[in-house]
Image: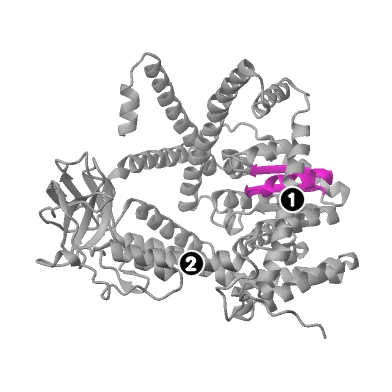
Amino acid sequence: MRSEPESPVPVRSMDNPAAAPGTATWLTVRPLRVLQRTALVLALATAGGRLALAEDAATATGEARVDTTQIGAAPVAPPPIRFATPGSVTAVDEPNDNGHALRVTWSLSADDALITTYDVYRVPSTGADPSSYVKVGSVPRGTTTFTYLADAESQEGAANPAFLATGAPATVVVRAATIDDGISEWSSPATGTPRGNWFHTGKVNILIATLLFGLAVVWFIQQSKSGRPLYIRPLPGINAVDEAIGRATEMGRPILFVLGTGTAGDIATIAGYTILARVAKKTAEYQTPLLVPVNDPVMMAMAQETVKEAYLQAGRPDVYRPESVYYISAMQFPYVAAVNGLMLRERTATNFYMGVFHAESLLLAEAGSMTGSIQISGTDQVSQIPFFVAATDYTLIGEELYAASAYLSQEPVLMGPLKAQDWAKIVILVFILLGVIAWTFGSDVFYQWVKTV
Amino acid sequence: MRKQLPIFIVFLSGILMVLQYFIPHQASEDLFTYANDFVIVIGILSLPIGIFSLLNATVMKARREPNERFYALVTLAGFAVMVISGLKREWFNDGHGLNRMLFQNALNPAQSSLFAMLAFYIASAAYRAFRVRTILAGVLLVTAFIVMLRIVPLPGVLSEVNGEAVRWILGVPNLAAKRAIIIGVALGGIAYSIKILLGIERSYLGRD
């Protein structure tokens, strides 16, 4: 039996991980020793905090630690105080928050140009030793404000010393610092009490706009109920629904309805159910097979209920097959693969895509296009609309999808909100025009006003 | 009662969530977290229903259509393997565990391949979109040509002129159209939400 010559150098193994095969061993082992010696020399030559760095370097090589007590190291000296202290420190409750934040302010240090940061510390208790202060934040020089936010009572299983409890006073101090350990004296302490707020004053504008819009919706619903005729412009995508269902019926092929890859709570998905109900009612009447593969179990339950109810309303509950609405996968691409396979095998005559779509929009629409299906799409995802416009026959763009229920039913209560939307758009257009005119004539008053509001 | 109760629940939870948006207090945040937890719990509880639906639909199809049996077998086998491979924690967490191996070496490459097909689909969709049938399609073609020219190295002045043109196209007409759609979607979303809260829109309950 041939035996291998004994290697002159140690071989890397589980027992001896530091060693490496061949000449690499010298390259890896020798410099380590050099490093160790260098670190030791450095450790002897320096004192104070720098000694620790040398000790770390030696430790990193895997050798014995440098014992600082044996080499006569001087005790660690506190960093020198070289800069003027920031003054007038205040700590007040942060407005519009959950009650776990303080706004700390101070006046700049006289040496602001020389320092790097202002460090904010929490004082654990009155008269506590500065070594027990907890650093809670740091801001660059020239800054006079810091929001001290700490709403986590514990961190990694341990109590968070920086936690700000609602209603409990907290004391903070500030000092200036540089990257080379230069510091100022501690500022005078400031105490503040964080309190939770029951109304966000910064959202008053949103509240007013929402209330006004809500009132407009209710007013227009009342108007339409009183018999005032309301006009909705034709939506070709919705008009084509009946034609698409008729085509599938004539060809004797199924209809595919895709509700997208959103969630059951998305408005576009909910709007998709409206169109699904309409389609299902027609397929029940014509006894055309309907396939609704979904990617979310909750969506599946809702879609099943929608289709079942539509078959009931059409007077054909016997035609309804629960397995026609089924779950595939919550993952995007497996879902797409399954739906594309369905299109190719079942040769669906009509495909509907109504809901929230992401990258799968074009994958689905192109596969449908290859099988020669008539395709109607609708989504509120701006990034996917161009793909649908390019690859499908009809597209409901954004709000048109939401308007489908009103358009299909022509019920006054559903058409009222559409009018409110139109008026809101007119108001926005007027604002845009005023801004353009003001800006054209060199005035930024309107712009500033809008920005403030 | 079957319809009124869900509408009442929708109204109550919807109003609570609207109010929550304007209340930054800790109690309000806790309510929001609690509501979100509910959504997660409902999602998890509904998963067995989804799995049953998948298996049921697959078996039914295999029974009804002989041509589908092979695909049904692949689906059922894939499902069984992934479930079994996830039974032990180490199979799932360990880098060389069966479940992780299947994820990394079977599912991920398959997903990436499908995603890569998007590049070819974009080309075929672009071909259809750029066929000059109308004046608008012609405008689209010219605009797309100018924008695509931006990534081609052009000599000095041409590059500057093209750069300015592309900046204008993307920053003015394109952005204006996008913002118009976004404003429409936002207003439509609010109006739709109000309709749902008030119980006017009930299509999600199975009513046309």
Q: Which residues are magenta?
A: A349-378
Give the residue type at disc 2: Leu
Q: Mark 2 vs mark 1: which is more N-terminal?
A: 2
Pick the residue in front: A32 or A218.
Answer: A32
A362 is within the stretch colored magenta:
yes
Residue A292 magenta: no
Outermost residue toward the top in this view: A441
Q: Residue B117 at what x, y percent from top left?
A: 75, 48
Does the rendering let one see residue A229?
Answer: no
Q: Amino acid at mark 1?
A: Lys
Q: CA distance from mark 2 to mark 1?
A: 80 Å
Most foreground residue, A61 or A88: A61
Left/right of residue A391 with respect to residue A125 in the rendered view: right
Q: Quadrant of the N terminus of chain A?
A: bottom right
Residue denoted by label 1:
A282
Q: Position of residue A45 (x, y in %)?
A: 29, 62
* In the rendered image, the vertical position of residue A274 relative to residue A391, given as above or below: below
Q: Position of residue B35 (x, y in %)?
A: 43, 64
Please tell me whether mark 2 or mark 1 is closer to you in this view: 2
Lateral position of residue A196 relative to residue B113, left or right:
left
Q: Using the image, tell me which numbered label, if any, was put on residue A32.
A: 2
Front-lying residue, A294 or A270: A294
Q: Residue at x 53, y 56 (%)?
A: A265
